Amino acid sequence: MDSVYSPQQIEAKWYQYWLDNKFFHSEPDGREPYTIVIPPPNVTGVLHMGHMLNNTIQDILVRRARMTGKNACWVPGTDHASIATEAKVVGKLAEQGIKKTDLTREQFLEHAWDWTREHGGIILKQLRRLGASCDWDRTGFTMDEQRSASVIRVFCDLYDKGLIYRGVRMVNWDPKALTALSDEEVVFQEHHGKLYYLRYKVEGEDSYAIVATTRPETIMGDTAMCINPNNPKTAWLKGKRVIVPLVGRVIPVIEDDYVDIEFGTGCLKVTPAHDVNDYMLGEKYNLPSIDIFNDNGTLSEAAGLYVGMDRFDCREQIVRDLDAAGLLEKQEDYTNNVGFSERTHVPIEPKLSMQWFLKMEHLAKIALDPVIEDDIRFYPAKYKNTYKHWLENIKDWCISRQLWWGHRIPAYYLPEGGFVVAESAQQALEKAKQQTGNESLTIEDLRQDPDCLDTWFSSWLWPISLFNGILDPGNKEISYYYPTTDLVTGPDIIFFWVARMIMAGYEYEGKMPFRNVYFTGIVRDKLGRKMSKSLGNSPDPIELIDKYGADGVRMGMMLSAPAGNDILFDDALCEQGRNFNNKIWNCFRLIKGWQVADIEQPLYAQLATRWFSSQLARTAAQMEDLFSKYRLSEALMAVYKLFWDEFSAWYLEMIKPQYGSPIDKTTYHLTLSYFDSLLKLLHPFMPFITEELWQNIEPRKTGDTIMLQQLDVYPAADNDLLDAVENLKQVVTAIRNIRQQRNIPQKQQLVLQVVGASIFDEAMSQVITKLSNLSQITVVGQKSANSASFIVTVTEYAVPLDAFINVDDELKKLEADLQYQEGFLATVMKKLANERFVQNAKPEVVVMERKKQADAESRIAALKDSIAAIKTQAK
RNA sequence: GGGCGCUUAGCUCAGCUGGUUUAGAGCGUCUGCCUUACAAGCAGAGGGUCUGCGGUUCGAAUCCGUAAGCGCCCACCA
């Protein structure tokens, strides 16, 4: 075995082995199920660091669940990502000089499917490099047959329940993707623009009303001016009419206290077609609505002016023209929030249009309580607030998208007007005949709605549709795997996805979709910046795996990822992970390199094995507790320290045979069993190296795997023993420290004197002797002159030094120690001198303080003795 | 403009219902070691008074108030 662990071939080998043996596959059985559905990544996406974190966490949970006797099932899959994918396909076609409008729907979809087949599933392949133990046989896709049929059925069902309606509403329009968006798909960003002050001439007068606006290009859509009836400054405009600059249209001045008296000039231009608030004013006062924009954001015929010009070019031009016409009073810098499309990053245009909506009142109601009452638990819990606030202020969900890539809305329009909603054209025809009484209708007479459904309208069914719970309710799989156990996702999609899955879960299964939600943080670079392509600070996960090994990268991700906290990613973390792999590897080399003899187990090894078994029990219990709280990074740290500090640095040094000597059989086998236990505890975090070494501990049968081993059950830890060894370790450390400070070579054997009585039995003495390279330990009444002394708990120890002693240094150390102890005693005495403390504090607290006092006093006495002794010698 | 969260060693973070020796961990730093498992290592050490202020209490990093800084979410001020 090489002294450096090289993960490359080993990882590929075992992943294939796991696949070949179908270890990831799950079928319902008598065991308790443990289920996770993957947050489906974009089907044509590639793996980024966020996925790495998210999927590492899921794999850790799934592997741990398998090892605790559960029937673990992790279902992978991908999302069709309607807007994103369609945009990519449109872009690719554009490169070939093809416009979407040149193609029929069918032709376009063919291109889209080609694209999906070409790039689809790359990300799932990449997940295998990470070690993800997904049940690949169950891989789903939001647009595969089963999932599509589920979506359509749910649409029809909700329509029949009266929860889906169609209507003209003000929606968020994306002029680049040419579709409506839901409120959640709009991100507000600060925008540094200008506030323009425009002059509206008062009809029949030679005076002007000034309006402040950020969007002068919308004046062609103005159909009123609004003032606050209580504003004295604008009272002179009451009942008058004004003329829209350039346009020349005469519009009324209306009054509404919606207008903020303090803002701008107190006059508001009202453009009902292009502003949500203006729309409401328009409704209230029956104003005409002039839609001056085409779908792509250019000026429409209805604008009358600047027809065909882009909205932002138009803004610049109209400002120039207004200025030239003397109708621009002034302009000033202004910062406001502008809504952008989450996907295409262009400013959203509020637009009146006919869309499909899902009523939220009922669904929000059934989704709120389970989270508030902790039936579904959020980790961290702070997201409960966010969730509550959203549900309590929710608006209807715009579910239609003017796109082709997605699930087509199953609404069919009739020749004579009206429509029917049905799962298939055939069923639609039946309904249409019934509804119209016209038996001669044919399928060709029906025209299906051209729009698609929002991508999230399929994702929200994911935990149900993956087990076919919509099409085949109550089937064996949905009954077994649902509700799923844990959901691991980012807080950024708490509304898009998490909340809506909860709605669908209660609506269609009558039960929660998952019991726990683990919200991960955002992966940032070490300077705290978000990872982005433009900054170039986002490492390629696959390159990282090549460099550090999947186990190393997984550990790097987990070392600093408490639930919900952003992680500041640094290659150095992967390096730490890789180093740990190497440490494990070399421990194994050491143990397997020993010669084993059928000899009696030495006393020191008896102690060491008893002690380590307790140590193992204690850490395993800690880890169980940490896992139950989803504190995975702390669980990892616990086993990291157990392995590195307790097992490698202490235990192995304790039992290590002399060079050239064999180890006794008992200790050897116990050590291998501890190593085996450690590998199991480590396996969920580092699946590859643990499998490799587990397979080499002893000959294994074909089909054996650490993956399916159960965690060991340990007898309760012996706390007295653990404490005693902690004492022992302190003594060893103190002796090593004496060596270090005085430059005493390792090979030089020392004598340890225990002043008074020793608390160490023979076994412990052997261990101390071994670890500190002593020639002997003696119990003395009075320590030797010229010795370095130290105190552990209340026992004083001394190491005679002779030539190595430096009286001044020794004195300095003792005096510093004395000063500390006296300071400490003072704080204790202060408490004890306070009568109210002695009266009010719990008795055990007072007892403890008295113990502190006694201990400190005895240490102070010993220190004073030592100082006095040194001083007399020095004379 | 609301709401929430955070501020503990150089960095990243623990510290649950206030009292287990004048606060812990990992990494980094410093010192000494190429000691036949591992220099991707071994051994040892140093380093914070817990953002400021005020309060409650016998006792506060831990509870309350307040100020400042940072972050997140929500919101139609043109």
Image: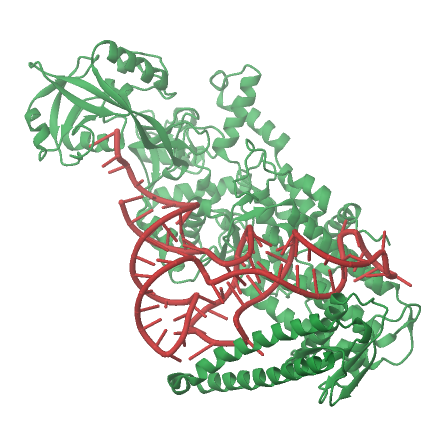
Chain colours: A green, B red
Task: For residue A631, say whether it is visible.
Answer: no
Taking the image as shown, residue B68 lies to the left or right of residue A609, namely left
Residue A492 rendering spot, x and y as whole percentages: 46, 45
- The correct choice, above or below, for A773 with respect to A689 in the image is below
Task: For residue A318, say whether it is visible.
Answer: yes
Q: Residue A545's quadrant in the figure?
A: top right
Q: Report the residue at 92% width, 77% height from top.
A: A598
Residue A651 rendering spot, x and y as whole percentages: 76, 70
Q: Residue A179's quadrant in the figure?
A: top left
Quarter of the image that includes the N terminus of chain A = bottom right
Of residues A601 and A813, the one drawn nearer to the viewer in this rendering = A813
- The correct choice, above or below, for A681 with respect to A531 in the image is below
Toward the front, the furthest residue is: A875
Of residues A247 and A464, the one drawn nearer to the viewer in this rendering = A247
Residue A743 rendering spot, x and y as whole percentages: 78, 65
Q: Report the residue at 72% width, 65% height from top.
A: A678
Taking the image as shown, residue A665 lies to the left or right of residue A798, namely right
Taking the image as shown, residue A37 lies to the left or right of residue A167, namely right
Toward the right, the furthest residue is: A660
Q: Report the residue at 53% width, 22% height from top.
A: A91
Quarter of the image that includes the C terminus of chain A = bottom right
- The correct choice, above or below, for A497 with respect to B37 in the image is above
The mark tally for this picture is 0
Of residues A764 and A508, the one drawn nearer to the viewer in this rendering = A764
Of residues A209 and A122, the one drawn nearer to the viewer in this rendering = A209
Taking the image as shown, residue A865 lies to the left or right of residue A751, namely left
Q: Report the residue at 61% width, 53% height from top.
A: A558
- The correct choice, above or below, for A710 with respect to A801 in the image is above
Toward the top, the furthest residue is: A324
Residue A660 rendering spot, x and y as whole percentages: 93, 68
